[in-house]
Amino acid sequence: MKRHYDFLIVGAGLFGAVFAREATDAGKSCLVIDRRPHVAGNIYSEQVEGIEVHRYGAHIFHTSDQAVWDYVSRFATFNRFTNSPLARYGDELYHLPFNMNTFHALWGVKTPAEAKAKIEEARAPYAGREPRNLEEQALSLVGEDIYVKLVKGYTEKQWGRPCSELPAFIIRRLPLRFTYDDNYFSDPLQGIPEEGYTAMVERMLEGADVLLSTDYFSDRAAFNALADRVIFTGRIDEYYGAKFGRLSYRSLRFETETLDLPDFQGHAVVNYTEREVPYTRIIEHKHFVYGTQAKTVITREYPAAWKEGDEPYYPVNDETNNALYARYAALAEKEEKTVFGGRLGLYRYLDMDKIVAEALSLSRRLLGEGQPICAGK
């Protein structure tokens, strides 16, 4: 460690790693610290039985931004993986996203015209009403068959509440595709690093000093004194001691096991849409990179209510929490030394490509202008 740095970066996830790379390349010194015992944050992956395991859920990099794709490709070779999850309802299997394969399995229709007519028939009893909750919103969009089998149970597990108690705005639309294309994302650039995300992030962090298993809040004043600027990617409400109240988050729990067989489900991701099944999906990691190992590793993913001490995975961007975040953001704009970034610092759900773009934008502004600017402004 040096005695003093240009930047202290709190969080060794993707946002922090991209900023550290740009700052280091600009000749700046960086100290990166993280509470966890590893780099890469929620995209951390590690080898088990020769299989790269995504420890915090499936992460598929996808983007329409060629510049972002070119940037991450400097640090990793991406395979051609296409995200095309399956949905299991009882003993029935359906293709996602909702497309002609899904509609054929549901109703036996074979053409887009037949599928559109069936959906109009299904949603007709609910059309023309002002939806009072998520359930009514979904029924007005797709009707009962799709809602019951593919939306209701999965959504209730994700949010921990009945759909009839969730606000309608959570589902503003449900994408319906009238082609036999199972590609979940519409982005043309998509894949997974062949050596795993951890190796990619480690390359981004080369040249920076990194301290793991290190809690910024254990001695904030001492850490702040080590650098001219602080890039903070943790919870913005925690940074301010939750002085206005805690923001809400959803968390996840993972159960991972190694199985002594070459294949478990024949697919990378299978969603379980029944409410009675406690997990939302099973991930079989070897299928992300077309593995042929003798064994396989699977992970069951369970949504969970968040409480202090748990890992916050998803901000709950409802009206109440957004208003609360605005109060913290107003404090952040007055900071002279600390700049906030990342999903938790900005209290926004951001896909990985958007994280990279935000970090690059911040680095250009801070390194180019030398002014304290809050990411996302």
Image (spheres, grey):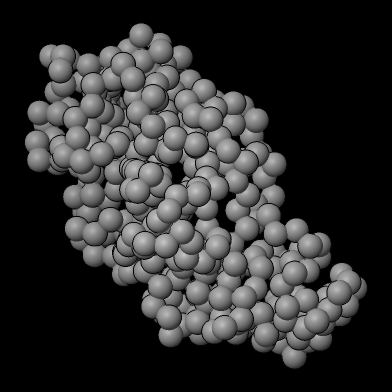
| Picture layout, residue 236 above or below residue 18 | below
Q: Is residue 177 left or right of residue 26?
A: right
Depth check, front residue: 125 or 293: 293
Q: Indicate the position of residue 364 as horizontal and vertical percent values.
A: 48, 20
- Name which quarter of the figure residue 52 lies in: top left
**Could you tell whether 340 is left or right of 149 in the image?**
left
Between 135 and 88, which is closer to the camera in this rendering? 88
Q: Where 160 sits versus 345, above or below?
A: below
Give residue 204's quadrant in the image. top left
Total marks in image: 0
Residue at x 14%, y 29% (from the top left corner): 223
Tell me if residue 36 can be seen: yes
Residue 376 can be seen, yes or no: no
| Residue furthest bottom as drawn | 125
Identify which residue is drawn at 43% across, 38% down: 196
- Give x and y (percent) for residue 46: 34, 43
Task: Write down the quadrant of residue 129 in the picture.
Answer: bottom right
Pick the residue in front: 63 or 163.
63
Q: Is residue 319 left or right of residue 313?
A: right
| Residue 354 position (above or below residue 253) | above
Q: What percent of the width, then of the height, locates residue 278? A: 39, 78
For this rendering, which residue is in front, 337 or 248? 248
